[in-house]
């Protein structure tokens, strides 16, 4: 039985795409390169062995003369730089129509409908904002009024922040469900996100990440998860993957709110015996949520080094019939102006103990090449092509 471990190192972009200006990105975004400079070098010996330093210039991670993995980068075909768009495309579902964004806040008809159906009395903010900054600015006003803080970002998100002592979590989640139903048609934002926090003053406010919940849009078409499920393969999600795909096409869900939990769960699945072909799809979110959006390159670098330590253990325990793919979904450069995602190429590292040598796979035209390579490894490439699914396998002629 063959297995694919598809691991998304969230927000680990490797350089601005040519169309970055269309997304109002700051100049010079290159998440991994700039993080390494801010940290005065990174210690990532296992990622270096695979060939990460051969993809972009990373201080402390030199190019390898004999990398053990296939290495390269991919451009995003879809017009976006958000979590949903990136994950859907790497799962074989590029978007022909981007999700709506709200640089001036949500329209009056959406806000009025939300207030009417929730009975919340009013809202605060309604503009793009940093999730931590908005609590400092409006958290105490929320405690006075009970009104939820509604904010967005450069991404297609409708975020609702409430204090867990003021508004019960069940109420917050119910309000998110109402918002999800309102945001349909032309205003179908990719995600509604519950953002509970705690504390009584602006100096004490802290987001309760363990109680965050995402209400995503169901995929608009078939993904590699649906395809593999229909062909008797087990599909396993670790971390927020199940939320991103609304559990569609996923047979087994392994939770994991933190990188530490997800890294341990990935290793446990590597050690499991398998009686079917399998895709294990995981997201390591903290590089994005804890450090990218919070302009913390030092924390970002430390998180990468912890991922690298776990990677060393995974490499030891992978079987010849396993394929490990390490990638990202977008950038979120913590060293440039702003706190939003950045439109960047994503890295691709693909490794199996059965590979004789590493090679460059160049610059791929779409993240969907990851889905095509996944089904190729599981010997389903012909059926994928028969269904006219997108992407080209980077395994062909390279293993």
Image (cartoon, rainbow, N blue to C red):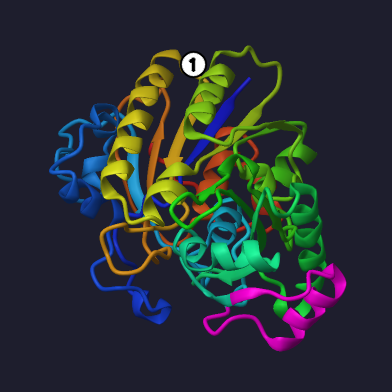
Which residue appears at 51% of the width and 20% of the height? 267
Q: Nearer the viewer, residue 138 or 154?
A: 138
Residue 287 placement (x, y as % from top left): 40, 45
Q: Quadrant of the C terminus?
A: top left
Residue at 38% x, 53% y is: 292
Asked if the stretch drawn in magenta spans residue 108, the answer is yes
- Left or right side of 207 for 223: right
Residue linked to disc 1: 319
In the image, the segment drawn in magenta is: 102-125
Quarter of the figure with residue 123 = bottom right
Quarter containing the N terminus: top right
Work out whether residue 254 can be spotted.
Answer: yes
- Residue drawn 75% across and 44% down? 247
Residue depicted at 26% across the width and 37% down the height = 51
355 or 132: nearer the eye? 132
On screen, residue 214 versus residue 24, left or right, reads right
Whether residue 51 is in magenta: the answer is no
Left or right, 201 with respect to 175, comes to left
Q: Position of residue 289 (x, y in %)?
A: 47, 50
- Observer-nearest of 283 and 319: 283
Q: Is residue 184 visible?
A: no
Mark 1 crowd level (few <14, some 14–19, many ≥20, 10 Å Cα): some
Where is residue 226? Give x, y as percent. 74, 46
């Amino acid at each position: 039985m063959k297995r694919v471990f598809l691991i998304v190192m969230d927000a680990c972009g490797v350089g601005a795409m040519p169309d970055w200006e269309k997304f109002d990105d700051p100049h010079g975004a290159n998440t991994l390169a700039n993080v390494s400079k801010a940290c005065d070098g990174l210690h990532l010996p296992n990622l270096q062995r695979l060939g990460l330093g051969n993809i972009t210039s990373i201080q402390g991670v030199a190019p390898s003369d004999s990398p053990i993995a296939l290495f390269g980068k991919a451009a995003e075909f879809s017009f976006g730089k958000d979590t949903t768009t990136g994950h859907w495309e790497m799962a074989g579902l590029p978007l022909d129509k981007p999700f709506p964004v709200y640089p001036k806040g949500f329209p009056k008809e959406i806000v009025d409908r939300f207030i009417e159906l929730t009975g919340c009395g009013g809202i605060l903010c309604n503009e793009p904002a940093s999730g931590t900054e908005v609590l400092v600015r409006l958290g105490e006003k929320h405690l006075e009024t009970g009104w939820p803080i509604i904010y967005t970002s450069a991404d297609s998100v409708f975020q609702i922040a409430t204090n867990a002592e003021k508004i019960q979590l069940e109420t917050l989640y119910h309000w998110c469900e109402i918002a999800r139903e309102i945001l349909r048609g032309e205003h179908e934002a990719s995600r509604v996100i519950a953002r509970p926090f705690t504390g009584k003053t602006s100096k004490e406010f802290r987001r309760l990440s363990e109680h965050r919940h995402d209400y995503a849009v169901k995929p608009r078409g078939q993904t590699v998860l649906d395809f593999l499920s229909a062909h008797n393969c087990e599909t396993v999600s670790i971390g927020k993957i199940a939320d991103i795909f609304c559990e569609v096409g996923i047979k087994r869900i392994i939770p994991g709110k933190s990188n530490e939990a997800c890294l341990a769960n990935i290793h446990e699945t590597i050690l499991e015996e398998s009686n079917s072909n399998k895709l294990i799809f995981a997201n390591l979110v903290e590089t994005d949520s804890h450090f990218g959006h919070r302009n913390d390159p030092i924390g970002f670098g430390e998180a990468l080094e912890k991922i690298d330590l776990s990677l060393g253990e995974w490499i030891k325990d992978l079987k010849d019939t396993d394929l490990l793919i390490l990638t990202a979904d977008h950038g979120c450069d913590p060293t440039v102006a702003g706190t939003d995602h950045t439109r960047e190429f994503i890295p691709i590292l693909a490794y199996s103990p059965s590979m004789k040598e590493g090679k460059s796979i160049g610059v791929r035209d779409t993240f969907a090449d990851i889905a095509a390579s996944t089904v190729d490894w599981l010997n389903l490439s012909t059926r994928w092509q028969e269904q006219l699914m997108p992407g080209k396998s980077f395994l062909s002629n390279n293993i």
